Amino acid sequence: MTADETPVRRRRGPSMADVAQLAGVSGQTVSRVANGRHNVDAATRDRVLAAMREVGYRPNSAARALRNGQSRSIGVIVFGLSSFGNTRTLDAVATAATASGYAVNLIPVPDATQSALAGAFDRLGAQAVDGVIILIEAHRLDEADVRMPEGMPVVVIDSNADLDYPVVDTDQAQGARLATEHLLDLGHQTVWHLGGPEDSYAASRRLRSWRQTLIDRGCPVPPVLTGDWTAGSGYDAGRRLAADPDVTAVFAANDQMALGLLRALHECGRAVPGNVSVVGFDDMEEAAQFWPPLTTIRQFFGEVARRSVDALVEEIQAGEHHHQPVAVGTELVVRASTAPPRP
Amino acid sequence: MTADETPVRRRRGPSMADVAQLAGVSGQTVSRVANGRHNVDAATRDRVLAAMREVGYRPNSAARALRNGQSRSIGVIVFGLSSFGNTRTLDAVATAATASGYAVNLIPVPDATQSALAGAFDRLGAQAVDGVIILIEAHRLDEADVRMPEGMPVVVIDSNADLDYPVVDTDQAQGARLATEHLLDLGHQTVWHLGGPEDSYAASRRLRSWRQTLIDRGCPVPPVLTGDWTAGSGYDAGRRLAADPDVTAVFAANDQMALGLLRALHECGRAVPGNVSVVGFDDMEEAAQFWPPLTTIRQFFGEVARRSVDALVEEIQAGEHHHQPVAVGTELVVRASTAPPRP
DNA sequence: GCCTCCGATGTTTACGTCAACATTTCTGAC
DNA sequence: GTCAGAAATGTTGACGTAAACATCGGAGGC
């Protein structure tokens, strides 16, 4: 006697056919109602709607994707979700995509190895996505043979323009100039720079712009210190800067490194902003609560994300590239960590 | 004269049929090769593999999902991506899910309103996901009528056990006890608490455990201050605490509020840890670089995420609930912000 | 009153994949 | 040499949806 024990199989949800039968119409009519077509009699529509509610009908997105050749979802390839900027951007990308009616497929790159990156692009190919937003430092990108499925719309955030894809980014150069000029305007002889990692395009653009600003103003260009975006690396650099009494103004390439820098200066008894002025970059939420509150460059991550999604959606729907890079401006936020040099 | 301008339509990629034709086999054989079945002749397999490479074949996941009734993807509903813990957890969830062969569908909840939440669950229904991980404060969850599609596997992170779903979470009570006992062990008469928002289950558990620890030790229980997780709210509370000379030890419910608290204490000339000791919660990366470096409770977000994904995948594949809540332990990290009270 | 046309609705089919079953080919025992 | 059985490969159909086309009924023009 075979006990008919139903195996714990995933019960498929109700389909159009179920709704159609209950409402006494054809599946096609249900489809028309589901898609908001207006060539359906009001009474029929109500009947179908009621039937949908009754059976708990949900359109099957897999079937839709198969039928239409579009999944209404975008992939977001992101490395280093723990980095502050990427997080904010991802949040905004997800919100913007949702608002545009697209789902977000998160494709993490666990580490910076080439194989991990290749794996991510591979997985991307297996996903049904209509387009891709890449949120990785560009120099890393070049290394891997980035082979998108042919004709896949792509937008790159925070990257360089070498790639053959539309690019949206914060105007790093403008921000770095703002930071540097702020310190010079306060009367400092020159500005030291604590840069981000060398393989970051954003970092190198900030660095270049800082240097150019000093040159334009006829100031000496001090040697560059290089960190890796983390507060810990900012601390290490700060220990070295604190030992040099010539240093009166430092522009750190992000707020986190500025935090470590502040700690090192405190530890070495160098007052901020009394002895040394510090400017950060990002304006992360905590920057206002640093000790002292940090003067910094505010990035508009939401704007960057929105523009990226808009560009991608347009490319998906119209098939048009906008190879014109988009640069989103920044804003100087003056707080207590900067002051004129002590005479 | 109608110019036959090809509309810029999405070209569908090559399908099994294309590969099959090129390799001179049936589509089924291609399917077997694609799925790694071993009942295929080695020579045939090679021929098919070569054909796949040549035409750039990618399995169509929509068709697979339709055929198999599974999408091999999970939805992650998250509110407040900007909050530190959620970010770390999401990162780890994505990594763990990828390792388990599941894609991640990010479903953001833009704000805390009920309609936004309902919208997220609605969108979830439209997504083809095999399971869901919910990363929202629980008290918010209760309000909305959380109506999952029938039979949808769900795991809840960082929430309470009232819901009829498996729960994985950091052991908030253990962490709060660790923090409180550390301060008491240093010799403080009692410990003040700067709690998280009232509608957060994590916050209320930390608060309850702090209070219980004080009671167990026979210490007076000071009034509670309530923040909203942000550094700014920590600062506001700090101003009030700094004004009270009785306060010698404070346990802040997260590191960000502790940061604001530190700033307020500095501003009011109260030395840390000379006059006041401070303990945080989370051990965010920056905590070691606060001034002074923050003693805090380390959470293992990666562990929480991994356990959640494992539980969900098991539920998906085996159809079994584990309603036993999982609690991941924490660890006290002693840094410079705590010391014995000044005699 | 007849015919046309339009709007509402139904029927058929294909999207790409893979389980189930059918067929063919090969291996080895007698 | 014959035949059973296993291994390799092919054929059919269904998953849920929606475009394309077919059908039907009624409104309006003459």
Image (cartoon, coloured by chain):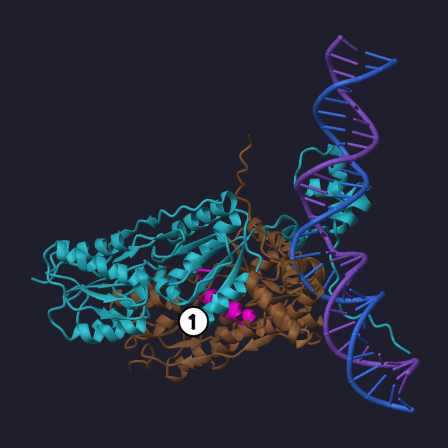
Chain colours: A brown, B cyan, C purple, D blue
Q: Which residue sits at x=70%, y=40%?
A: B32
Q: Is residue A199 above or below residue A303?
A: above
Decide which of A31, B236 is in the foreground and name it. A31
Q: Which residue sits at x=15%, y=58%?
A: B214
The dominant secondary structure in magenta is helix
Q: Which segment did they paint magenta?
A: A81-98
Q: Can residue B83 be seen at all in this image of the molecule? A: yes
Q: Position of residue B285 (x, y in %)?
A: 36, 59
The chain letter for the residue carrying disc 1 is: B
User: Is residue A237 toward the left or the right of residue B195 in the image?
Assistant: right
User: Is residue B222 toward the left or the right of residue A210 in the image?
Assistant: left
Q: Classify residue B30 by image quadrant.
A: top right
Q: Position of residue A132 (x, y in %)?
A: 61, 63
Quadrant in the picture for the N terminus of chain B: bottom right
Decide which of A58, A200 is in the foreground and name it. A58
Count numbered badges in the picture. 1
- Mark 1 closeness class: few <14, some 14–19, many ≥20 residues within 10 Å: some
**In magenta segment, residue A17:** no
User: Is residue B307 toward the left or the right of residue A133 in the image?
Assistant: left
Q: Which residue sits at x=74%, y=42%?
A: B28
Identify the residue under disc 1: B114
Q: Which residue sits at x=23%, y=62%?
A: B207
Q: Residue furthest left?
A: B343
Quadrant in the picture for the C terminus of chain B: bottom left
- For badge 1, the amino acid type reads Gln
Q: Classify residue B29 by image quadrant.
A: top right
Decide which of A15, C26 is in the foreground and name it. A15
Q: Position of residue B191 (x, y in %)?
A: 16, 62
Q: Is residue B287 above or below residue C8?
A: above
Q: Position of residue A178 (x, y in %)?
A: 46, 80
Q: Classify residue A77 by image quadrant.
A: bottom right
**In magenta segment, residue A88:** yes
